[in-house]
Image (cartoon, grey):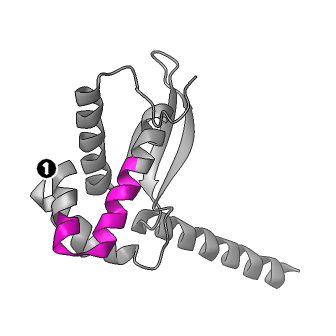
Amino acid sequence: MRHMKRGKKLGRNASHRKALMRNMAVSLFRHERIETTEAKAKVLKSFAERIITLAKRGDLHARRLVAVDINDKQMVQKLFQDLGPRFAERNGGYTRVLKLGHRKGDAAPMALIELTDTEVFEKKKQEKEEKATRKRIEEEDSG
């Protein structure tokens, strides 16, 4: 039985899994959205959210704990200067996983993992609202 066995192994040994999560987290924080397999995205979600929660604290101890997992000084700086304050009002749920379908080569289920309050997402949301408003105005004028 798998009682109390948390996390997926992803077909890798512990050190490879740890390196994979660190690299994917750096990519996620750098680009704010990445495309990967569903299984990796789900594991990365919990890893990244723990790091963002530490970044929200903003103290020296939290910075050192993050620096253990994130070996890129620029990304640690971005976490504490940009992402931590951005998510200060939010209690969890800093990332979202969107399913994309299957990869052509091996039919692996793919997913997009992104930070929730990204400017790209906000711009698309505003564009949709503006489009809906324009459509409503056109209907009122014609009808």
Identify whether 92 is placed above or below 97. below
Which residue of the protein is positioned furthest toward the right in this rendering?
143
Identify whether 39 is placed above or below 26. above
Frontmost residue, 82 versus 139:
82
Amino acid type, label 1: Asn
Frontmost residue, 24 versus 57:
57
Residue 76 is situated, as x and y percent measured from the top left of the image, at 18, 62
Task: Please tell me which residue is depicted at 48% across the width and 74% down the height of the picture.
Answer: 90
* Quadrant housing the C terminus: bottom right
Frontmost residue, 9 versus 120:
9
Which residue of the protein is positioned furthest toward the left in this rendering?
73
> Magenta region: which residues?
47-63
Identify whether 38 is placed above or below 112. above
Q: Is residue 127 left or right of residue 94?
A: right
Q: Is residue 23 left or right of residue 47?
A: left
Task: Please tell me which residue is depicted at 40% across the width and 25% down the height of the picture.
Answer: 10
For disc 1, the neighbor class at 10 Å (few under 14, some 14 to 19, many from 20) is few
Mark 1: secondary structure: loop
Principal secondary structure, stretch drawn in magenta? helix
Residue 79 is situated, as x and y percent measured from the top left of the image, at 25, 65
